[in-house]
Image (cartoon, helix red, strand yellow):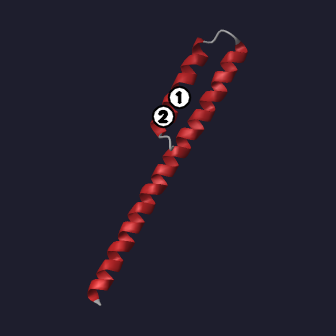
Amino acid sequence: MAQTFEFYDARANEAAAEAKRATLDNVRERCLRAEKTWRGLAQQAERVASNREKADRERAARREEEALNAAAN
């Protein structure tokens, strides 16, 4: 199941909020590590979505060009 940027960003925000509420250092540190990981996953999901959109546009352009070439022949 592919997760979205929004999902990862929401988890990061939850971890950041939990870190602010934490009274124990080790809990705060754990939450901050979790936030960092979630933010990294969010950035990766954003890059994947962007790359997928670019690849889709390139495929569509290639199909259009092939259709025009086929119609010309």
Q: Secondary structure at mark 2?
A: helix
Residue type indicated by callout 1: Arg
Image height of 40 relative to 18, above or below:
below
Location of residue 10 in the rendering, given as x and y in whole percent from the top left corner? 49, 29
- Looking at the image, which residue is at 48% across and 34% down? 7
- Looking at the image, which residue is at 66% across and 28% down? 33
Residue type indicated by callout 2: Phe
Q: Would you name the residue on which mark 1 appears?
A: 11
- Looking at the image, which residue is at 41% across and 66% down? 58
Location of residue 53 in the rendering, given as x and y in whole percent from the top left corner? 42, 56
Measured in 3D between alpha carbons, the distance from the residue under mark 1 to the one under mark 2, in whole angstroms, is: 6 Å
Q: Secondary structure at mark 1?
A: helix
Which of the 4 quarters of the picture holds residue 32?
top right
Image height of 39 relative to 67, above or below:
above
- Looking at the image, which residue is at 53% across and 23% down? 14
Q: Would you name the residue on which mark 2 appears?
A: 7
Which of the 4 quarters of the picture holds residue 41?
top right
Image height of 56 relative to 64, above or below:
above
Image marks 1 and 2: residues in contact by CB distance under 8 Å: yes
Locate the C terminus by quadrant.
Answer: bottom left
Number of labels in the image equals 2
Instruction: Point out the residue furthest to the top here.
Output: 23
| Neighbours of disc 2 within 10 Å: few (<14), some (14-19), many (20+) | few
Instruction: Point out the residue furthest to the left here.
Output: 71
